[in-house]
């Protein structure tokens, strides 16, 4: 059973997954195109951080940044050994539920152009492609998506 719950990005297992995600992003995209939040930024009051676990083992992370009129999906990552088990779907549903509970009208996100599995996940959940939003600027590595809630 997959359990999705609030978590602490400083928990050693969550930090390990986040660092693995950051290393992957750094290997795929130029530094100026990486928009991930570091561990301390994920502890800010406007960030709602979630973990996915099976038993006591943390298998994935996801965060919702409160951006006022919308929520932004951040730090979606699933342990490569646990992919294909519905963990990313469960995390994304929890983030959507959290955003709805906060009264957000939509969810938005930035993702890398080569992260095809992520694109399929977001499309499956009703996200559509859009122009850059917030402080983002168009670049050759980023795609932007939104979902009206």
Image (spheres, rainbow, N blue to C red):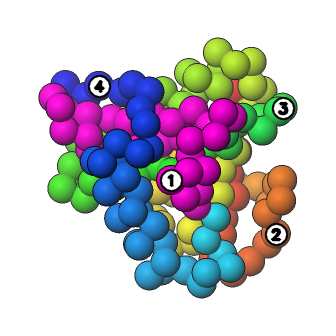
Q: Is residue 123 above or below residue 34?
A: above
What is the x, y in percent for residue 22? 45, 67
* Image depth: mark 3 or mark 1 in front: 1
SS class, disc 2: loop
Q: Residue at x 74, y 18 (%)?
A: 103
Q: Earlier in the sequence, mark 2 or mark 4?
A: 4
Q: Is residue 26 above or below residue 20?
A: below
State which quadrant residue 102 falls in. Answer: top right
Q: Which mark is residue 79?
A: none
Mark 1 in CB contact with mark 2 (< 8 angstroms): no
Q: Is residue 146 magenta?
A: no
CA–CA distance between discs 2 and 3? 19 Å
Q: Earlier in the sequence, mark 3 or mark 1?
A: 1
Q: Which mark is residue 39?
A: 1
Dot 3 corresponds to which residue?
Answer: 69
What is the x, y in percent for residue 13? 28, 47
Is any part of residue 79 visible from this angle? yes
Mark 2 in CB contact with mark 4 (< 8 angstroms): no
SS class, disc 1: loop
> Magenta span covers which residues?
36-63
Dot 2 corresponds to which residue?
Answer: 137
CA–CA distance between discs 3 and 1? 24 Å
What is the x, y in percent for residue 101? 64, 15
Dot 4 corresponds to which residue?
Answer: 3
Q: Earlier in the sequence, mark 2 or mark 3?
A: 3
Mark 2 in CB contact with mark 3 (< 8 angstroms): no
**10 Å neighbourhood of mark 4: few (<14), some, or many (≥20)?**
some
Q: Earlier in the sequence, mark 1 or mark 2?
A: 1
What is the x, y in percent for residue 118? 47, 56
Is any part of residue 89 visible from this angle? no
SS class, disc 4: strand
* Image depth: mark 1 or mark 4 in front: 1
């Amino acid at each position: 059973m997959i359990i999705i719950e609030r978590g602490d990005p400083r928990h050693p297992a969550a930090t390990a997954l986040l660092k693995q995600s950051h290393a992957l992003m750094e290997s795929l995209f130029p530094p100026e195109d990486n928009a991930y939040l570091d561990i301390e930024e994920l502890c800010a009051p406007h960030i709602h951080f979630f973990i996915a676990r099976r038993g006591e083992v943390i298998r994935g992370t996801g965060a919702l940044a409160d951006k006022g009129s919308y929520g932004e999906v951040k730090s979606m990552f699933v342990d490569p050994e646990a992919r294909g088990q519905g963990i990313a779907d469960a995390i994304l549903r929890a983030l959507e539920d959290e955003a709805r509970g906060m009264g957000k009208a939509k969810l938005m996100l930035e993702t890398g152009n080569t992260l095809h599995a992520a694109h399929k996940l977001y499309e499956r959940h009703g996200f559509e492609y859009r122009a850059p939003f917030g402080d983002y600027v168009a670049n050759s590595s980023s795609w932007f998506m939104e979902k009206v809630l």
